[in-house]
Image: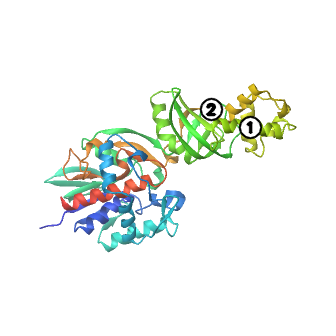
């Protein structure tokens, strides 16, 4: 019986996992990558350290339009399967606070091991090769590439999304999928920074502070995460903001009022925080207000908090009334930032939206419209939080598609 001849379009994490899995099962596999080298986007993941999965992977860490399909795949490809795959290709996983990295602490090591395993399994890799069109033909597909056409019995679309276009994610896969009749959920940047409508961030460039960031949409609480917030003139970023960006941007695109509220005493309850501030007033009552918060908050951040609370410079802290202390507490625990926009794809880590998960079979990720066509990775409408969840999806979906294509 002739081997399945499989084309994997896209040489990122999902595409390489699909290629390796299919080749191990006896398929004749070729990866078609339009950049000059495969695995380029991997090099920038996890700040160059490649956080490739997490010990707590679950559907709650993702956004998609079909939770049933997402849950089914994550159940079949839990954290341990990704760890096993990594060890099989030579990567030694180490866990730090639930986050898994290669022992070398280098994303390049993961990319190199994927490339080496492709070579060992006989996977053909063609770089600087852009697929222009996919056409059904005699039970398989004809792929148009520059000046030639080539037949493959199965095709796996693993082209990625549009985030970080300098790594090769230019959205071409969406065009290929749409041309074959697939429904696309509108795409937007995710895991990215947010911009502010007012002047509350003016002068805070370069400030970093620990906070609990809460997202409010039309005045209603939606989600919250804790971590370090990074400030710039007119924008917020840092992982804690990235975690909220999908929902924040989604609400902006629907024309809803979107607000981030920052609590700079996140470890304390309301009662504890008020008592803490009262005790500080009593202890440092001789200090003028412009100096009173220094040592507790970064100087520039304290200046904005003081102004938000309506407390004049030169006023001694010991003179503050309980009503003024209440305003101070609100400025510290609910620092309000009205959101009016977000960073573009060039500064985003992942893409939200893409090929609807309802368009594929839950167990194989095969197209429900075009038999023999499979999807893997970011091209599908699945995006996760920071913490290794997006790379977990890339590897898991790539393995699932590769196995199904090889055995079809």
| Front residue (pair 14, 244) | 244
The reply to whether residue 192 is visible in this rendering is no
| Front residue (pair 40, 198) | 198
Callout 1: SS: helix
Q: CA distance from mark 1 to mark 2?
A: 19 Å
Instruction: Tally the marks.
Output: 2
Label 2, on which residue?
336
Who comes first in sequence, dot 1 or dot 2? 1
Q: Position of residue 124 (x, y in %)?
A: 30, 68
Label 1, on which residue?
277
Relative side of 106 to 334, left or right: left
| Outermost right residue | 286
At a point 38% along the width and 68% down the height, the residue shown is 115
Q: Position of residue 19 (x, y in %)?
A: 30, 63
At a point 41% along the width and 70% down the height, the residue shown is 113
Which image quadrant for residue 65? top left
Q: Which mark is residue 216?
A: none
Q: Position of residue 43 (x, y in %)?
A: 48, 61
At a point 58% along the width and 40% down the height, the residue shown is 213
């Amino acid at each position: 019986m002739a081997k399945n001849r499989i084309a994997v379009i896209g040489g990122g994490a999902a595409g390489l996992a699909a290629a390796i899995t299919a080749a191990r099962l006896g398929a004749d596999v070729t990866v078609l990558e339009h950049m000059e080298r495969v695995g380029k986007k991997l090099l920038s993941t996890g700040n160059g350290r490649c956080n490739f999965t997490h010990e707590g992977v679950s559907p709650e860490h993702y956004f998609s339009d079909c939770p049933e399909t997402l849950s089914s795949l994550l159940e079949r490809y839990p954290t341990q399967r990704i760890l096993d795959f990594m060890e099989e290709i030579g990567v030694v996983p180490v866990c730090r606070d639930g986050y898994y990295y290669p022992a070398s602490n280098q994303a390049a090591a993961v990319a190199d091991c994927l490339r080496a395993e492709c070579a060992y399994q006989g996977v053909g890799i063609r770089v600087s090769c852009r697929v222009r069109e996919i056409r059904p033909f005699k039970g398989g597909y004809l792929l148009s590439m520059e000046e030639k056409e080539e037949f493959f019995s199965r095709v796996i679309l693993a082209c990625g999304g549009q985030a970080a276009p300098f790594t090769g994610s230019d959205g071409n896969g969406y065009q290929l999928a749409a041309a074959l009749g697939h429904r696309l959920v509108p795409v937007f940047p995710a895991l990215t920074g947010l911009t502010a409508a007012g002047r509350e961030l003016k002068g805070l460039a370069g400030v970093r502070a620990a906070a609990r960031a809460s997202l409010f949409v039309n005045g209603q609480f939606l989600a919250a995460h804790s971590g370090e917030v990074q400030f710039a003139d007119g924008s917020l970023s840092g992982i804690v903001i990235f975690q909220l960006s999908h929902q924040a941007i989604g609400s902006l695109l629907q024309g809803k009022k979107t607000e981030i509220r920052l609590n700079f005493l996140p470890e304390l309850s309301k009662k504890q925080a008020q008592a803490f501030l009262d005790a500080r007033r009593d202890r440092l009552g001789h200090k003028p207000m412009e100096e009173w918060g220094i040592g507790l908050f970064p100087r520039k951040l304290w200046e904005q908090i003081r102004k938000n609370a309506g407390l004049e410079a030169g006023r001694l802290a010991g003179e503050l009334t309980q009503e003024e202390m209440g305003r101070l507490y609100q400025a510290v625990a609910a620092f309000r930032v009205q959101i009016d926009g977000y960073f573009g794809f060039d500064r985003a880590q992942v893409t939200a939206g893409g090929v609807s998960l309802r368009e594929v079979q839950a167990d194989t990720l095969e197209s429900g419209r075009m038999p023999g066509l499979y999807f893997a990775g970011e091209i599908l409408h699945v995006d996760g939080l920071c913490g290794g969840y997006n790379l977990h999806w890339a590897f898991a979906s790539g393995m699932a598609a590769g196995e199904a294509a090889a055995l079809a």
